[in-house]
Amino acid sequence: MIGAAGYTLFMLVLVAASVIEGSMPIFSFEGIGFFFGTDWNPVEGREAYGALPYVVGTLVSSAIAMAIGVPISLGIAVFISEISPPRFGTPIGFIIEILAAIPSIIYGLWALFVFRFWIVDFIERPLYEAFGGTIPLFARTPFGLDIFTAGIVLAIMIIPIISSISREILKAIPNSQREAAYSLGATRWETVWKVLFPYAKAGLLGAAILGLGRAVGETMLVTMVIGNAVGANAIPDTLFSPSQTLSSIIANEFNEAVTVFHSSALIALGAVLFILTMGINVGARLLVSRMVKVTPGAKE
Amino acid sequence: MSWMSSEEYANTTSYKLSLLSDTKRRGYKVSVKNLNSWFGSKQALKDINFDVKENTVTALIGPSGCGKTTLIRCLNRMNEMTSSATVKGSVYLDDIDIYASNVDPVIIKRRMGMVFQKPNPFPTMSIYDNVAAGLKLNGIRNKALIREIVEESLKGAVLWDEVKDELGKPGLSLSGGQQQRLCIARALAMQPEVLLMDEPTSALDPIASAKIEELMNELRKELTVIIVTHNMQQAARVSDYTAFMYLGELVEYGPTKQIFENPQKELTERYISGKFG
Amino acid sequence: MNNIENNYHHNIDHRKVIQDAIVRQSYKRKIVNRVFTGVTIVCVMLAMIPLGSILFEVVKNGISAISIEFLTQPQGSIIRGGGGVGPAIQGTLLTVGYASLIGVPIGILAGVYLSEYAGNSKFAYTVRFFNSVMTGMPSIVIGIVGYIILVITIGSFNITAGAVALSIIMIPIVVAVTEETLKLVPNSIREAAHSLGIPKWKVTLFITLRSAKNGVLTGIVLAVSRVAGETAPLIMTILGTSLFFQGFVSPVDALPLRIWRFASQPYEHAHSFGWGAALVLIIMVLSLSILLRFLVLEKSFRLGSLVKTRG
């Protein structure tokens, strides 16, 4: 039994060891410059590999997802825990959980064949026509397979996680806090904004960061809609540019990698992703567990 | 509700009617008329009637589950925000039915403050900000005024001398009894006319409880206090009038001395003498 | 207290200032509160639209592809179409089953250990913490593990590599849910059994675990439905193939992989097959989730949200 528990720890070591072991060849080839390079050329004899564009692509697509997903998730969590009577809140929570159960490959399929046309028609093209000439951010004919689409679909993916954890955190706030606010004449909005959110700040931040961790690591969905640019082109110069993330390039190229360095470079991107998500998750877990386990109440 | 400015809204007849309170036609501060309340299909309050005089302390007593906490929450419309209870009947504050459709519940909360079973200061706020919370929430921006009211309210809750040098400390750094007085100060800052206290000493040690009881004696000079208590000695010590409740009904209501020394109903006598509950 | 002079008097001016402020802002606050309520409702609806659209499109586009041939036959010609996703369905069942054989026992044992034996030791805390961190590990990184330790050493893409990778995804979920449910078993049950002189391992196995059966099952179902939809780690472990199971050292197919490959082909019939495969997958996964809902109603709401954090 201790062995089984130990194994769960060992898995983490296994993951770390594997990605480090697998990425050794590329570090001997590119050195530390791997992290800052922007070239990507797997042709034997002219090989060059740099991780920077994919780190940028990952961070930008996740940032778009967070900017859209976090406010919506908080809105949902507040609606379920503070506004709606349980007879509505419970089924809504259930439906949101179904959203979480749908495999990401199906999100990807839907985004590729259905949703991206909505985005082009209802968001990107109007923005392009209105601001394309003046604001560089929108200065590119939208096609739908770009970092903006990827960000929005990622937002849809992370909403269930962030909203259900936030909901738990809001429910963990003692009722006496709400009573205190209401007894002073606060409206529901004022209670949520001025009392509950400050009280649950750390936990809500943790929930958002857990969502970020998921957005950063999400693979298939991004692979299908981000446009899969390679090398320096993967650094987006507008919102509507194709890009590439750490995980999407691994999925795209892994089976086509012929040379040792190409495989190793892809695994090294996995190592970068590993470090990134480890950092994010450790931080988020610390925040969430502090919030949920230690509920500060009246000291007696 | 059509779109209008706040000033226009404040000038509407219905809103003005909701604020009228200067005349005291009824002669009582709070009057409860035919008040019923249900949780789903379960009736929690049955036809409650009683009147409370100004500048008195009224105690609601009775065994657990008798509806006294539900009742006190119906008196300032707290029940609407925190539970699923439905209410029928009227509660008059002076001559306003607080359940009338044109009444602004925020004004009712201003006029009827509340203190709860467990001290519940806002943990992210300092002592000062806790007392000022209601003022800021309700749109008071004048810093000098806030400062004045905070000091006055802390003095009113007999906490000022203990905390005047550490107003910036978190509210949670205080002891349990101090926290409860902080919550009383927070309620007093809104300049209420009635203070509702829901078992305010149940989470406190005897010394801290005694301080709160003494404080109630002082508060009665300025406002009307209604207190729910488990503790019959406490009711006998602090209150002028006592209401005994049982299974959602108001069994007996009268001067405290009479309830404790010469109860009219057998049920009351049995409860007072500790035969059940 | 008597030595404190009580100079508390309600200042009528203060009362008026506060009342005036409330009156002045009453309307604005009501409006803000309504707008806020409206915004939260819009948020809920925004989240519902994708769900509705996904289910609608998958059913609409997938239903026409489904037939006996589709469910049982291997893929036909890439260009002309025909055939089915038989190998992918078989592969998903085999790989997920294999992964469960590895992951479920380890997950339950570790969960039991954490709940019944470890207490609050430093080791238990570490296991718990990193277990929850592992639930957030991107699945593609876990695929690399399968590739490095099993594909390279064996010399071919194979089902064991896929199963091991998926089990690494499953274990943290099973551990977390098992531990949480066992903690919900009231201590009095354990104490009653111990007082009869039953040894601890028997109490744990026959009494504690048995009364927590539903919860543990929840964890398993949750983990299975989670990995059944995984794609990324399979790319680098089982690769995918158009053939039925060929043995333990050959590539295997899986539904999510097949959907991905279909979607990247330029042919209309391939897209239709993609939707068909998506419909099969979604039915498998959602029926598991809904089964779960009936199995353990309220509890799974919470647990589900806590472990679904992987990329």
Image (cartoon, helix red, strand yellow):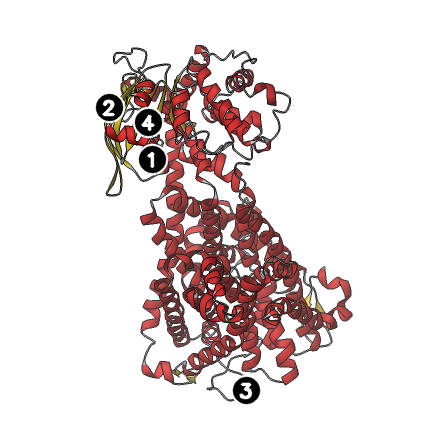
Q: Are marks 2 and 4 on the same chain?
A: yes
Task: Give the crowd class for mark 4: few <14, some 14-19, many >=20 residues within 10 Å.
Answer: many
Q: Nearer the viewer, mark 4 or mark 1?
A: 1
Report the amino acid beneath label 2.
Gln
Q: Within the image, what quadrant is residue A85 found in?
A: top left
Report the amino acid beneath label 1.
Pro
Task: From the top left corner, tell me how far across and down residue A24 is, in percent.
Answer: 74, 71
Q: Which mark is residue A66?
A: none
Q: In terms of secondary structure, where does tag 3 sit?
A: loop
Q: Nearer the viewer, mark 3 or mark 2?
A: 2
Q: In terms of secondary structure, where does tag 4 sit?
A: loop
Residue designated by label 1: B63
> Disc 2 or 1, which lies upstream in sequence?
1
Report the amino acid beneath label 3.
Phe
Residue name at image x 56 percent, y 35 percent: B124
Task: Please give the chain letter of the residue carrying mark 4.
Answer: B
Q: Are marks 1 and 3 on the same chain?
A: no
Task: From the top left corner, tell me how far across and down residue A247 is, in percent.
Answer: 59, 65
Task: From the top left corner, tell me how far across and down residue C191 is, in percent.
Answer: 48, 61
